[in-house]
């Protein structure tokens, strides 16, 4: 769509929204069912597009994108009636007789801006929440995953209500134009720099924003962990999608004395999952583009590589790579890696991991592998992160009852399950008073005895 047409298109959605078509529960359910139908009927095309964009294996794409979204829709359909119902709260004595509740209402036309690394799921999971809440939506897929973007722009209009939903493909120019429009809410997924652009633009219209950003997610591994399971789960969560996952463990912190055993266990799992030559593995992804490939290759300059390190710029292949004790001033430890390099930082005692984490911006996710409940409590109470997963990586994403979102520099706001419904709703506060009697204590003329009675009931 040309930028000049964007304002008019968004206005049309707003008009449709104002007519009330998106509010009935039946409409919301029907749109969600249509989305489920789209996924079912186009599963192969979706998996092909994801492979084209990121070299993702079918099973990985199914688990992290297609199947994930199907579960999300099923969960939403199952609970939608309850989520949309008024939520009763108590009413204080001073307002008796009366009742109070929260009435969820849609917020209008919302803007969803997706990122390239899970280009299908990151655009459509927020859409599920936006539909559930009864909104219209504009979807902006990432231009860096063009196969998925084109497919979504083609498929969505054939399944969903075209008057309520619009896909705008494009890059900076189109997004900039979109951000000039007044929306009921903006949910942005991507990096911090653009997050600030989105928030600045939203401020012009006082539009609420959810920023799903990234950062360096630490992985604390204590020597009392279950080594084999820990290694398997770290390798799975780090090298899924070739490390291009916002909640991938960015780096490991472990005790120096435990480091040799951990490195060996990680290498064994890398071999077991991807073979001795991961370039030949059908199950290992590729880096999204040449710019990101170069950025990752530069990170390796002068580092102590103890596993992997092989790179092929032609195919944008970078092997699962482990780096030992990089300088904390190096770009590898200053920037979010977002690729298949796993630095290991060693300390004398695992407790030092807590201050290491606390000296850096609050992460999106924090992982802790330990069998020590006391260490678990210390890490939980003394650090901050969007989400914490103990003894696994990324699995918290599979629970729709847990909110997903960052804190501090890793983002603001949350979605998934009812949290997403609430994000795209306004929870209108309603109090209903009865009129069968009306105590006059709050009305002028004031008096000492009225004040005394007010204090008594307050
Ligand atoms: P990206 O390049 O795909 O950009 C994200 C979106 O911003 C795209 O739709 C793009 O068109 C738009 N955009 C880019 N430049 C813009 C500009 N100048 N003005 C307006 N819009 C613009 O993705 P990215 O930023 O490379 O994504 C990687 C980052 O996203 C990482 O930090 C990662 O951790 C984070 N991420 C977070 C989550 C999450 O759910 N929290 C998920 C995936 C990725």
Image (cartoon, grey):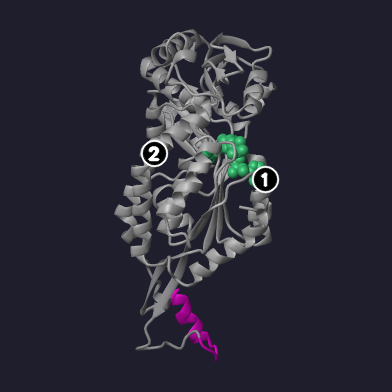
Q: Is residue 214 visible?
A: no
Q: Is residue 67 visible?
A: yes
User: In this rendering, would 447 be left or right of 39?
Assistant: right
Secondary structure of the residue carrying tag 2 is: helix
- Look at 37% across and 88% down and name the residue there: 437
- Residue 79: x %, y % from top left: 32, 55
Q: Is mark 1 within 8 Å of ligand 1?
A: yes
> Across the whole image, how many numbered discs are drawn on residues?
2
Q: Quadrant of the C terminus?
A: bottom left
User: Furthest-bottom residue in view?
Assistant: 445
Q: Which residue is mark 2?
A: 66
**98 inside magenta stretch:** no
Q: Which mark is residue 335?
A: none
In magenta, the rendered stretch is: 443-458
- Residue 4: x %, y % from top left: 67, 58
Q: Going from the N terminus, do you reach mark 2 or mark 1 first?
A: 2
Q: Which residue is mark 1?
A: 172
Label 2 packing within 10 angstroms: few (<14), some (14-19), many (20+): many
- Residue 427: x %, y % from top left: 46, 64
Q: CA distance from mark 2 to mark 1?
A: 27 Å
């Amino acid at each position: 769509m040309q930028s000049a047409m964007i304002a008019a298109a968004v206005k049309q959605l707003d008009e449709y929204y104002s007519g009330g078509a998106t509010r009935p529960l039946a409409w919301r359910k029907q749109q969600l069912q249509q989305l489920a139908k789209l996924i079912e009927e186009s599963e192969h095309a979706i998996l092909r597009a994801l492979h084209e964009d990121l070299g993702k294996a079918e099973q990985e794409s199914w688990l992290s994108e297609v199947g994930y979204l199907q579960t999300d829709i099923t969960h939403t359909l199952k609970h939608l009636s309850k989520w949309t119902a008024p939520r009763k709260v108590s009413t204080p004595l001073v307002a008796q007789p009366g009742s109070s509740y929260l009435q969820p209402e849609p917020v209008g036309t919302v803007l969803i801006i997706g990122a390239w690394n899970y280009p299908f799921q990151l655009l459509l999971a927020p859409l599920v929440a936006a539909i559930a809440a009864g909104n219209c939506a504009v979807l902006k897929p990432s231009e860096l995953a063009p196969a998925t973007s084109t497919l979504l722009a083609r498929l969505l209009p054939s399944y969903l209500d075209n008057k309520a939903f619009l896909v705008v493909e494009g890059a900076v120019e189109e997004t900039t134009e979109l951000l000039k429009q007044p929306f009921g809410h903006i949910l942005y997924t991507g990096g911090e720099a653009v997050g600030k652009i989105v928030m600045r633009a939203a401020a012009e219209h006082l539009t609420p924003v959810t920023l799903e950003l990234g950062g360096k997610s630490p992985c604390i591994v204590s020597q009392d962990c279950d080594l084999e399971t820990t290694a398997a789960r770290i390798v799975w969560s780090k090298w899924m999608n070739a490390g291009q996952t916002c909640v991938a463990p960015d780096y490991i912190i472990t005790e120096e004395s435990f480091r040799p055993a951990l490195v060996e266990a990680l290498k064994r799992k890398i071999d077991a999952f991807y073979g001795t030559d991961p370039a030949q593995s059908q199950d290992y992804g590729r880096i999204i583009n040449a710019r990101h490939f170069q950025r990752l290759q530069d990170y390796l300059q002068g580092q102590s590589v103890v596993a992997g390190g092989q790179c092929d710029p032609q195919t944008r292949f970078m092997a699962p790579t482990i780096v030992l004790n990089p300088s904390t001033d190096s770009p590898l430890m200053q920037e979010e890696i977002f690729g298949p390099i796993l630095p290991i930082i060693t300390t004398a005692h695992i407790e030092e991991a807590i201050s290491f984490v606390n000296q850096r911006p609050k992460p999106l996710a924090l992982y802790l592998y330990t069998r020590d409940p006391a260490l678990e409590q210390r890490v939980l109470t003394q650090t901050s992160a969007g989400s914490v997963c103990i003894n696994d990586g990324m699995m918290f994403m599979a629970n729709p009852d847990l909110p997903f979102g960052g804190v501090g520099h890793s983002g603001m706001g949350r979605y998934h399950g009812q949290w997403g419904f609430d994000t795209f709703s306004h929870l209108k506060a309603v109090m209903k008073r009865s009129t069968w009697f009306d105590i006059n204590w709050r009305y002028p003329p004031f008096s000492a005895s009225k004040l005394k009675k007010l204090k008594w009931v307050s």
